Amino acid sequence: MAAVRAERTRNLVRRSDPEKYVLDIVRSGDSGFGQAGRQAVLGAGDLVLLDSSQPFQAWHRSGGHEALRPGTPCGDAESLGLFDTALELLAALLAHELGSPHALPPESRQRSLVAPAHSFIDQHLGDPGLTPQTVADAHHVSLRRLQQVLAAADLSHAALVRRAAPARRTQVGPGAEGSLG
């Protein structure tokens, strides 16, 4: 298969800038990308994140790739749900790393707190000091904010503890040290 090349020039950016990031997944073969003076050659299974507000170059040789954005059809409903979740987590990570958590929509900020709170509770189930306040403190939010986010997800601190407890009991085993049962 011949190489396919694409380029987003400064002129194209000036004409139309959607101010979006594009996540490109190399499905098979190899691909190359260049942006902001950096070049990368990627193989099957690799990902690259491109900023549509900056010029970039791309080439694809032998195989396929897929540029993904929210709402991109990607198979069955389960795959689409996983894709949307992955993009949302990536957006939350980027916002956090860039020190811009308020750049995310409020719904994304809320959802990006539920999973880490659940994970924290699961990891600290045996700790007698596990309280809603310790969960809030660990995630650098107020107790009220944690309660609001959990309520928006139809959850509570107690519900998260109840949900995590059976899994923890199974991992540790009844009667074992640190067991809940």
Image (tube, rainbow, N blue to C red):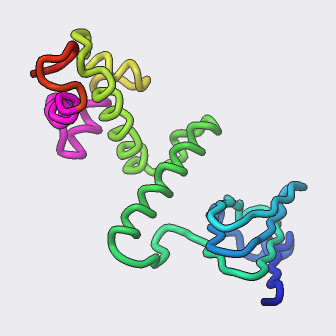
What residue lies at 61% left-to-right and 75% top-to-bottom?
66
- Residue 33 in the figure: left or right of residue 78: right
- Counting the numbered discs, the total is 0
What is the quadrant of the N terminus in the image?
A: bottom right
What is the quadrant of the C terminus in the image?
A: top left
Q: Which residues are magenta?
A: 145-170
Up/down of 176 relative to 85, above or below: above
Give the residue furthest to the right. 37
Location of residue 110 by image quarter: top left
Of residue 79 and residue 158, the one placed in the foreground of this image is: 79
Magenta segment: does it hold 158?
yes
Location of residue 177 by image quarter: top left
- Residue 86 in the figure: left or right of residue 118: right
Give the residue furthest to the bottom. 1
What residue lies at 71% left-to-right and 60% top-to-bottom?
51
Up/down of 19 relative to 115, above or below: below
What residue lies at 23% left-to-right and 25% top-to-bottom?
172
